[in-house]
Image (cartoon, helix red, strand yellow):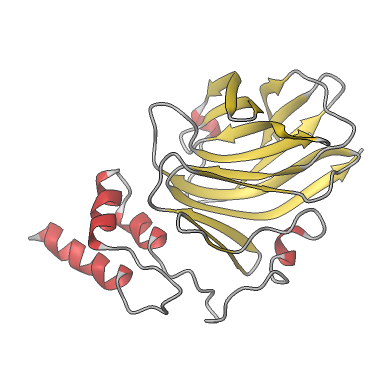
């Protein structure tokens, strides 16, 4: 009886009338998310309307509050990912496809970044293999299919990964609860560059996780999200060197 009551509350929150452009969760999607282990509060967040509080659709100009001149995030709904801006927070939301991901990269190569970072708050489904969670990404000019990324999962699992086309190669990984994220607080995720390569920095602390390959003189930088979850980003900044 208690479970039926909780489901009724969820249905009331997730299936409320919405504009036709916004997709509410179906009963099957709610049950699927609960079965994956998401809490009732997280399901309500995942199934919330995608409109900003003002009731007006966010415009590309609103996204400038998130990134200044570094990159302009995409806004819209492609059927798997909802991409929106609320205030100074960029939100990526996926409630259906565990194997899906989205990259948001700078349009122009940054010629001289020394470090870049973003604040992130997120919750996601776990997976026995593959990538889930958030990531910072960088690449080389003229090689759009070759990138490197640092991936952070909510349990403190950290991965350094090289990408070549459709191939993802694990360079190094570690797991430390001290680096755990989640949907309760924003964590500061950064990449610091030196002559030997790069290192992942979390909340100002060097993690020891490195990608030991020199960085190209020019290249794009950006963020990524992987798997089913709700991912929030704010204050994307970079420092030139």
Quadrant (top left/top right/bottom left/bottom right) for the N terminus: bottom left
Q: Is residue 59 above or below residue 129?
A: below
Which residue is depicted at the point 15% across and 65% down? 5
Quadrant (top left/top right/bottom left/bottom right) for the C terminus: top right
Which residue is depicted at the point 70% across and 32% down? 147
* Figure quadrant of residue 151: top right
Q: Is residue 75 above or below residue 118?
A: below
Which residue is depicted at the point 29% across and 71% down? 15
Which residue is depicted at the point 75% across and 42% down? 221
* Figure quadrant of residue 64: bottom right
- x, y percent for residue 83: 56, 60
- x, y percent for residue 87: 63, 69
Horizontal side of residue 11 vs 140, given as left or right: left
- x, y percent for residue 79: 45, 58
Counting every numbered tag in the picture gives 0
Horizontal side of residue 26 vs 23, given as left or right: left
Horizontal side of residue 69 vs 123, given as left or right: right
Judged from this view, the residue extending furthest toward the left is 1
- x, y percent for residue 31: 23, 53
């Amino acid at each position: 009886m208690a479970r039926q009551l909780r489901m009724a509350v969820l249905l009331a929150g997730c299936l409320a009338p919405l504009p036709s452009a916004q997709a509410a969760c179906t009963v099957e999607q709610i049950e699927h998310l609960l079965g994956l282990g998401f809490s009732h509060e997280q399901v309500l967040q995942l199934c919330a309307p995608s409109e900003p509080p003002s009731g007006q659709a966010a415009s590309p100009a609103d996204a400038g509050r998130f990134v200044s001149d570094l990159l302009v995030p995409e806004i819209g709904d492609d059927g798997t990912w909802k991409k929106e801006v609320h205030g100074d927070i960029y939100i990526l939301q996926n409630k259906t496809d565990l194997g899906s991901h989205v990259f948001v990269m700078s349009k122009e190569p940054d010629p001289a970044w020394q470090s870049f970072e973003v604040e992130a708050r997120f919750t996601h489904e776990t997976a026995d293999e593959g990538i889930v969670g958030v990531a910072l990404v960088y690449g080389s000019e003229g090689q759009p299919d070759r990138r490197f990324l640092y991936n952070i999962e909510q349990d403190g699992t950290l991965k350094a990964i090289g990408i070549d086309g459709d191939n993802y190669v694990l360079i190094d990984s570690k797991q430390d609860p001290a680096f755990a994220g989640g949907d309760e607080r924003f964590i500061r995720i950064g990449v610091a560059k030196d002559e030997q390569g790069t290192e992942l920095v979390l909340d100002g602390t060097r993690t020891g996780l490195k990608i030991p390959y020199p960085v190209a003189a020019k290249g794009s930088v950006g963020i990524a999200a992987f798997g089913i979850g709700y991912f929030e980003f704010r204050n994307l900044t970079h420092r030139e060197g």
